[in-house]
Image (cartoon, grey):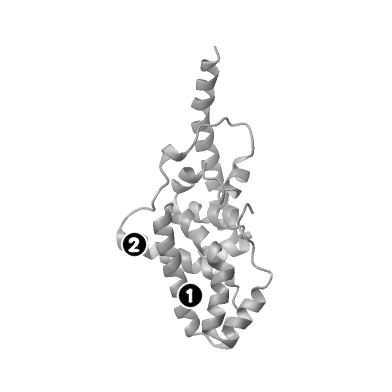
Amino acid sequence: MGDMPAEPDDSGEVLAALADDLDEGFAVLVRAYSRTVYSVAYRLCGRDTDAEDLAAESLLRAYRSLRGYDRDRILRLSLRSWLVTIVLNAWRNLLRDAGRRPGQVPMAELPERSVAGPSVEEQVERLETRDELGALVARLPESQRIAVVLRHVVGMPIAEVAAAMDCPEGTAKSHVSRGLRRIREDYTAAARPAAAAGGRSTR
């Protein structure tokens, strides 16, 4: 969805390359999936520098893990889900080690706009190129934030979201639904004063 690439059609070729030669195959994996890894990292961290560090750490963890996998295990991997899970685990470890909440996009970066236009769901899906709702996503509770990012930014089906979050599909759906509802409510509340101010200025 949005500008986020889906699972590459050549994922089987990437797996085969990894199984044949880990070092050369990993270079192929990075070319195919680095954008997905960085995009997830950025939506979780909210800042470029933190996202770059998290993406690099996640890819390093992926390489180390692959070194311990035999050929059959590598060929059975669902690369996108596997990499996203590594990013999530690395992010949680960073939060635990730092003892802080995720970085947030400053509210000043949320432009004033009317409620009319694309739905919140459509806006979230376009977060890859438009950051209007970045601050609102950053304010979500962790489980809702992860679910919304995976479902509407990465474009993963609910089954993959549930697998990445290690929860039942029904729970994943609930996290997505609650997260979108909270974004919608906050987005509407933020837009209402802007619309009122615009109306006053025309008098």
- Label 2: element kind: helix
Give neighbour class at mark 1: few <14, some 14-19, many 20+ (Cα, 10 Å).
some
How crowded pointer 2 is (Cα within 10 Å; few <14, some 14-19, many 20+) is rated as few
The quarter of the displayed image where residue 74 is located: bottom right
At 50% from the left and 81% from the top, the residue drawn is 66
When asked about the image quadrant of residue 99, the answer is bottom left
Residue situated furthest top in the rendering: 203
Q: Position of residue 79 (x, y in %)?
A: 58, 72
Q: Amino acid at mark 2?
A: Arg
Identity of the residue drawn at 54% across and 47% down: 178
- Relative vertical location of residue 94 with respect to residue 72 in this rendering, above or below: above
Q: Which mark, by number, is residue 62?
A: 1
Specify whether 4 is left or right of 196.
Answer: right
Which residue is the site of mark 2? 96
Query: Disc 1 on helix, strand or loop?
Result: helix
**Percent from the top left, x then y, of residue 32?**
59, 69
- Sequence-wise, the earlier of marks 2 and 1 is 1
Is residue 167 something that shows in the picture?
A: no
- Report the number of discs: 2
Q: Position of residue 147 (x, y in %)?
A: 53, 55
Task: Relative to 109, say whether 11 is above or below.
Answer: below
Q: Residue at x 62, y 63 (%)?
A: 159
Answer yes or no: is residue 176 visible. Answer: yes
Quarter of the image for residue 90 reads bottom left
Per the model, the C-alpha gap separating discs 2 and 1 is 20 Å
The N terminus lies in quadrant: bottom right
